Image (cartoon, rainbow, N blue to C red):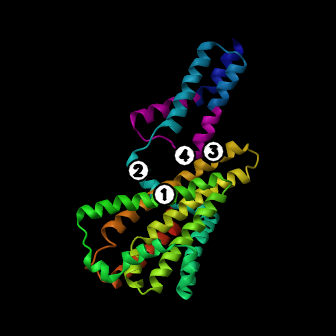
Amino acid sequence: MLREHQFVVHRQDRWGWWDRWLTARQAGASADDDGHALAAQFRGLCHDLAVAQDREYSPELVATLQTRVLAAHQAIYGAAGRPAFAWRRFLTHDLPQRVRDEHRLVGAAALLLLGSLLLVAALVVLMPATADLFLDARERAQIEAMYDPADAVQRGRDAADDWLMYGFYIASNVRIDFQCFAGGILFGAGSVFFLLVNGCVIGAAAGHVTAVGFGTPFWSFVAGHSAFELVGAVLSGAAGLMLGRGLLAPGVWPRSHALALEARRAVPLLIGAALLTALAAIVEAFWSPLRGVSPSIKYTVGIGLWLLTVLYFVRAGRDAA
């Protein structure tokens, strides 16, 4: 067919470019990976296939173009990078960038959790009786026993105890993180509720032990792991609020599709929360209970970890291409 022959002659240079590019990629040699040029070439190749199918050109030509399009698509989108490189990029760029992209919801989650924590802690220190609103008598007694310096002298922990507590802390933190995230399915209300409740309970516990005179054992214990634990909960809550956003403001999408899109976008925050939770459990199990370390050193380490955590999410990955 004359029209098909003219079509092939006119497009031959483009197809030859793809053949050379694919050959270079398969051989592991350097290929032209300029993003804009590659996108334009790929759109053109897909257009050629559509034209050939629409004009009912020969099956051989259509099959050749389909093979070339599939190979190009696989080379561009389907090739998996090295796992170590992918994780390095996630930690140095993708995670902090996604947190910055969602800074409004992250800020809202931080305000709900940390704001309620600090407010209730201050309230209980000033008016100790208000601890009854958040903690029953048994819970208050347990907290006092944990941080009473006189009792702490009598208690000893070995390596087995440390690992046991590590598992306990992981389970406890994961439960809180899951509540803050999964609650988002209730149009975000569940995430708001669990962020507030956990903030109030933690704040009441902190205020109560401070009010009864056990502030130094408590604050020196929590200083080291508090940044990882609380920021992990904040990220989980922000991920839950993203689910709520998809349900409350789906835009042009059906709610189910908007929810799926938001859940996919929330994955980096959940991975970040999981990593922070694991770090918090390690510090809480193996560093926080050390008796030979003075409170001032533990406070210094805790402040340093807070500064590093905040700096990481504010600055990391800003210069990445």
Mark 4 — residue? 34
Q: Residue at x 45, y 56 (%)?
A: 274
Mark 1 — residue? 175
In which quadrant of the rendered view does residue 234 lie? bottom right
Query: Which numbered disc, 1 or 3, marks the residue closer to the eye?
Result: 1
- Say whether residue 167 is left or right of residue 208: left
- Mark number displayed over residue 71: none
In the rendered structure, does residue 263 fall within the stretch colored magenta?
no
- Mark number displayed over residue 85: 2
Query: Which numbered disc, 1 or 4, marks the residue closer to the eye?
Result: 1
- CB within 8 Å, label 1 to label 4: no
Residue in front for this viewpoint, 131 or 260: 131
Residue type at mark 2: give it. Answer: Phe
Residue type at mark 4: give it. Answer: Asp
Per the rendered image, the range of residues in magenta is: 15-44
- CB within 8 Å, label 3 to label 2: no
Which of disc 2 and disc 3 is earlier in sequence?
2
Q: CA distance from mark 3 to mark 4?
A: 31 Å
Q: Residue at x 63, y 50 (%)?
A: 262
- Say whether residue 57 is left or right of residue 147: right
Label 4 sits on a secondary structure element that is loop
Residue type at mark 3: give it. Answer: Ala
Mark 3 — residue? 260
Which of disc 1 and disc 2 is earlier in sequence?
2
Taking the image as drawn, is residue 102 in sight? no
Q: Main secondary structure of the magenta part?
A: helix
| Residue lying furthest left | 158
